[in-house]
Image: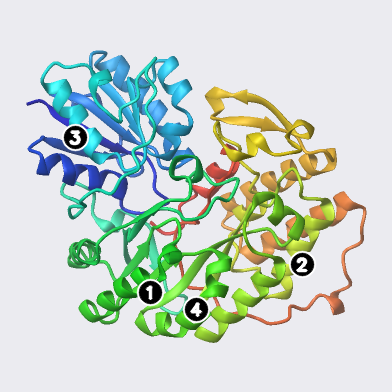
Amino acid sequence: MSEVLLVSCYELGHPPLSIAWPAAFLREAGVSVRVLDLAVDEFSPPALRGVSLVAVAVPMLTALRLGVEAASRVRAAQPQTHIAFFGLYAWLNRAMLLEDGVADSVLAGESEPALVALAQALAEGRAASTVPGVGTRGREQAPVLQRIAFPIPDRHGLPPLARYARYLPGDGEAVLAGSVEASRGCLHTCRHCPVVPIYHGRFFVVPVNTVLADVRQQVEAGARHITFADPDFLNGPGHAMKVTHALAAAHPGLTFDFTAKVEHIVKHAALFPELFTLGCRFVISAVESVSDHVLHELRKGHTRADVVTALAILDAAGIALQPTLVAFTPWTSLDDYIDTLEFIRAHGLTRHVPPVQLSIRLLVPPGSLLERAEDAAQWLRELEPREFRFAWRHPDPRMDILHEAVASRVELAAERGEPADETWAAVRALAYTAAGRPLPVPEDDAPARVRPDSPRLSEAWFCCAEPRQIQVGLVKGGR
C-alpha cells in the first residue's frame, strides 16, 4: 500500500495533535504514514514520493491559509495525488476547497475512521465518493458526530518539543511544553465560534487513560508543562477533575493550563483552589468584550460582572487569567472599546493581555451562525471565498479607521518587541483621539492593582480573528 502524508500547518505553537491522532488511527489500521508540520518544517516535493493521499489538518484559519498554499505545491509537483482537508475550517470552507479544486475531499468532526476508510479505498482503486463521511465535489457529507475509540496519539516522526512554544512560569526559566486533549467539541453555541457549525453543542470525552498515556510520552520527551487544548476543559468538570488528579499522581510537579468559559469559571468556583494544588497555573478564557450588549450579540453566556467575578475566583486560587478578546465587532462602539482598555488597566492586566488581542477583528467564516444575525443586513457584506470569510463594515466608520490604526500600531510593536503595557498605552491614546476625548490625567490613571508577570506560553493565543491579526499573532516569542 502506498503512503499517506499527514500535514499540520499551525496549532498555536503546540505540537500538532491534529495529525498525531490520525497517525495513530491509520497506523493501527496498517496504513503507512508520514507526518509533516509546516509550522516548523519546510515543504519539499521529495516528501511526496510514494504518497497517494495528502491529508491536511486545518483546525483554524491560519492553518487553512497555509494548507491551501501547501496543496497548490502538491498539485504542481504530483497532480495525481489525492488531497483531503480535514478539521473545523475544512468544513466551513468546503465549497471553495472543492469547487476550486484545492481539495479532492473534505472531512470534519470525529473524522479519523473516515480518513482511514478513505486511505483504504484509494489504495484499492475505489473512488473517494464511495466513502461515508467523506465529502467530494457534488457530494456533500455532514461532519461525523459519533463516539469513536481513541488510540494513544502517535507522535512518531514529529519534530522535538524544543521546536515548539515553551512555558514561561513568570518567575523562572522557560521549560518545554506539551499539548493534549481531554475532550473534543463543545457544549455551547456561541455565535462566532467555528466549533459550533460542526458540533452543534455536542462534545466527546477522551478516556482518562488515553490522555495520561499521551501526557506520559510527552513528559518522557522533556515536557514539564501541559496545555489541555480542549475548546472548553470544563464542559465536563467531573471528567476534568479525574484527568487532573490522575495527572498530578503520575507526574508530581507537572504544571498545566486550560481554556474555559467565563461562565464555567463562575459556576465551578469551588474547583479552582484544588486545580491550583494539582498544578494549574493559568486559564485562558474567551472574555471577548466587557460590553454586555456585545456579549449578548455573541451569545457568550456571561456578563461584564461575571468577568470581574471570574478574576476574583482565579486570584483567590493563585491562578492567572489570560483573557482573549474580539476587540472589534459590528456592535462595539468607540466608548465600548475605550471601556475595555480601561477595564484592562483597572484590573492590572496591561501586561497580561497580548497586544494582538487589542486588534482582533471579528471573523465571520462561511457557515457562521452570525450570517443569520437579526441585524446582519446593517453590517454584513459579500462572501470572499478565497479570503475564507464574509466582509463586514462597522456602522460607525470611525471604528474601521480605528481598527486600521490599532492593527498597524500592534504590528509595529510586535516587530520591535515592545512591552505589552507600552503598546496598551499607545493603543489607548489612539482610541481616545478617535473619540475626541482627552486622556485621563495621570493622578486618575493608577491601576486598581499591580499584578506580577503572568505564567504563559511563549506564543500568543488567538482565535476568531481576521488574517491581519493572525499574522501579528504569529510572531514567535521564545521558540
Q: What residue type is labelled 4?
A: Ile
Mark in the foreground, 2 or 1? 2
Residue 361 as seen in the image, left or right of residue 444? left
Q: What residue type is labelled 1?
A: Glu
Query: Helix, strand, or loop for circle 1?
Result: loop
Q: Residue at x 69, y 65 (%)?
A: 303
Image coords of residue 8 (percent x, y): 32, 40
Q: Do the residues labelled 4 and 3 touch (CB within 8 Å)?
A: no
Tell me the crowding category of disc 1: few under 14, some 14 to 19, or many 20 or more residues within 10 angstroms, Cα based.
few
Q: Which mark is residue 116?
A: 3
Q: Which quadrant, please, contains the C terminus?
A: bottom left
How many numbered discs sit on the rendered protein?
A: 4
Task: Pick whichever of labels 2 and 1 is earlier in the sequence.
Answer: 1
Q: Which amino acid does label 3 sit on?
A: Val
What is the C-alpha distance between the residues marked 2 and 4? 22 Å
Q: Do the residues labelled 3 and 1 touch (CB within 8 Å)?
A: no
Give residue 112's quadrant in the image: top left
Question: Which residue is tagged 1?
Answer: 173
Q: Residue 319 carries which label?
A: 4
Q: Are marks 2 and 4 in contact (CB under 8 Å)?
A: no
What is the C-alpha distance between the residues marked 3 and 1? 42 Å
Give the vertical position of 20 relative to 51 (above or below). Answer: below
Residue 387 as seen in the image, left or right of residue 295? left
What is the C-alpha distance between the residues marked 3 and 2? 51 Å
Give the vertical position of 99 relative to 289 (above or below). Answer: above
Q: Which residue is drawn at 70% across and 49% down?
A: 297
Task: Pick whichever of labels 4 and 3 is earlier in the sequence.
Answer: 3
Tell me the crowding category of disc 4: few under 14, some 14 to 19, or many 20 or more residues within 10 angstroms, Cα based.
many
Q: Which quadrant, please, contains the N terminus?
A: top left
Q: Which residue is drawn at 57% across and 80% down?
A: 313
Mark in the foreground, 2 or 4? 4
